[in-house]
Amino acid sequence: MADNFYTYNHVVTPQDATVLGMAYDAKYLDWACIARERMIVEHADLRQIEWPAFLTGEVLIRYLYPVFLNQKVEVRVSIQDYSEEQGRAKLLFRYVNPDSMRLLAEGHQIIFFVNHASGSRTSLPASFVTLADKFFERKNTVS
């Protein structure tokens, strides 16, 4: 597991859970998107990024253990792959119970940066490259 990851802390709320108290599967995606956005806001120079800056091209989440109402969840985000020239990055997400350190789910997103005015793909902003290097897990090519 990566030592260099961003952590978003969440407590499962009634809006996150079924009437039986188990978190909806789609909420894991919400938490990943919130974690991704918080990582960018807290660690990138937003003056270098024209918003909206990227699109999500792929999402995968593998569920291992359920999460229930009022449980704590850490969403740990790291960058596995990125291509500065092609404007894409693969972000890894690991959902961990901070009390037991049990891995609850894991997955990834591939994002593509675009020019806001034209909608065309663009290279990664320098600020995102700096962020990617900070939370980098290992070097591969994005599939």
Image: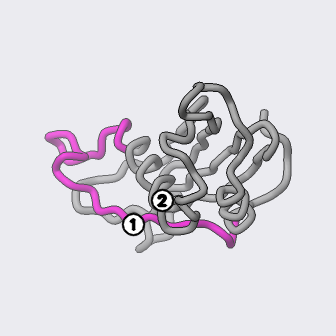
Q: Quadrant of the N terminus?
A: bottom right
Q: How is this picture coloured?
A: one colour
- Image quadrant in which you'd find residue 113: top right
Q: Can residue 66 be seen at all in this image of the molecule?
A: yes
What residue is disc 1 on? 9
Seen from the viewer's position, the closer of residues 131 and 137 is: 131
Q: Can residue 1 be seen at all in this image of the molecule?
A: no
Query: Residue at coordinates 55% horizontally, 30% vertically from top-left?
Result: 117
Identity of the residue furthest to the front in this view:
117
What residue is disc 2 on? 75
Q: Picture coordinates of residue 27 (x, y %)? A: 35, 42
Q: Quadrant of the C terminus?
A: top right
Give the class, few, some or many, for how many residues have Cα within 10 Å of label 2's Cα (few <14, many ≥20): many
Element on which disc 2 rests: strand
Q: Picture coordinates of residue 110 (x, y %)? A: 64, 38
Query: Residue at coordinates 67% horizontally, 70% vertically from top-left?
Result: 4
Question: What amino acid does circle 2 point to?
Answer: Val
Say whether marks 1 and 2 touch (CB < 8 Å). Answer: yes
Q: In the image, which residues are magenta? A: 1-27
Residue 17 is left or right of residue 39, and the answer is left
Q: Above or below — where is 122 with respect to 119?
A: below
Q: Earlier in the sequence, mark 1 or mark 2?
A: 1
Identity of the residue furthest to the right in this view:
140
Query: Residue at coordinates 62% horizontally, 34% vertically from top-left?
Result: 114
Question: What amino acid does circle 1 point to?
Answer: Asn
Give the class, few, some or many, for how many residues have Cα within 10 Å of label 1's Cα (few <14, many ≥20): some
Seen from the viewer's position, the closer of residues 5 and 123 is: 123
Disc tally is 2
Residue 33 is left or right of residue 15, and the answer is right
